[in-house]
Image (cartoon, rainbow, N blue to C red):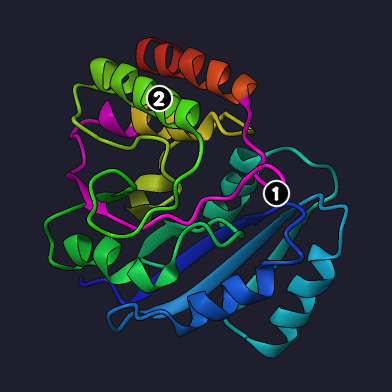
Amino acid sequence: MAPSKLTVVIPCYNEESTLEHLVDRVLAADCLGLAKELIIVDDGSKDKSVEVAKSLKSKHPEISLFEHQINQGKGAALRTGFSKATGDIVLVQDADLEYNPAEYPRLLKPILDGRADVVFGSRFRTTEETRVLYFWHSIGNQVLTLASNMMTNLNLTDMETCYKAFRREIIQGVDIQENRFGFEPEITAKIAHLDPQPRIYEVGISYSGRTYKEGKKIGWKDGVRALWCIFYYNLFR
């Protein structure tokens, strides 16, 4: 049966300044005829993110809100969101404005065409605009992607990307253990080793990254954890 509904899972932690604008973009996005379900998971925000989310939920029936009382991390928020998803396709969308929902058609088309089961949005396989930011972050990303590819035998260019779309039965069939940013290498490893292996595609996307002053949260410790996750979940999944 052809997919008819998209679930967009939005993990949120202290994003009161961007959440409403982001949700407006998601609601306006072209989803190639799919109905939309938005699941916001607030991960123990200390600002007014929950109030913003509740206001949005009251205006838009397609929005659901789930709250973590204590901050656990992006992976934990996604685990909650994935478990509640009812759409045929499930897509990850950060609550900041680094990734543009107007590019959903690129992520959805390979699945809707029946060619893909999982789609990664690559910030490096693109001709779109990309904000110039941190050199060592880009090197770290390339190292982590290379290490991941060596363990999974995939040829991804951006394993750490936020934009990942899955057929729902695939993502709900994976036991996600990582609570923080280790989700990215964990899910990549576990999907790569499924039997049969899902059909994985990668499409170019734009990227408007943030500085730390603007709210960026990932740090060098997360990079070290990601490297550990690459080896652990490929060898001991």
Q: Which residue is drawn at 17% across and 60% down?
A: 110
Q: Relative to residue 14, is residue 191 drawn left or right?
A: left
Between 80 and 44, the one nearer to me in the picture: 44
Q: Residues within 10 Å of mark 1 (few under 14, many from 20)?
A: few
Q: Looking at the picture, which amino acid does disc 2 mark? A: Ile
Measured as percent of width and height from the top left, residue 160 is found at: 42, 36
Q: Say whether residue 86 is visible.
A: no
Instruction: Name the residue that disc number 1 marks.
Output: 215
Q: Relative to residue 196, is residue 142 drawn left or right?
A: right
The dot on residue 33 is none
Establish if 32 lies above or below 1: below
Q: Residue at x 36, y 32 (%)?
A: 188
Q: Looking at the picture, which amino acid does disc 1 mark? A: Gly
Callout 2: SS? helix
Q: Is the magenta stretch mostly helix, strand or loop?
A: loop
Q: Relative to residue 228, is residue 216 drawn left or right?
A: right
Between 208 and 195, the one nearer to me in the picture: 208
Measured as percent of width and height from the top left, residue 26 is found at: 50, 75
In which quadrant of the rendered image does the N terminus lie?
A: bottom left
Dividing the picture into quadrants, the one containing residue 61 is: bottom right
In which quadrant of the rendered image does the C terminus lie?
A: top left
Q: Which residue is drawn at 36% across and 16% down?
A: 234
Between 236 and 143, the one nearer to me in the picture: 143
Instruction: Farthest residue to the bottom: give it.
Output: 59
Establish if 151 lies above or below 162: above
User: Does label 1 or label 2 sit earlier along the sequence?
Assistant: 2
Callout 1: SS? loop
Q: Which residue is drawn at 32% across and 34% down?
A: 191
Instruction: Name the residue that disc number 2 marks.
Output: 139
Magenta part of the chain: 191-219
Measured as percent of width and height from the top left, residue 206 is found at: 36, 58
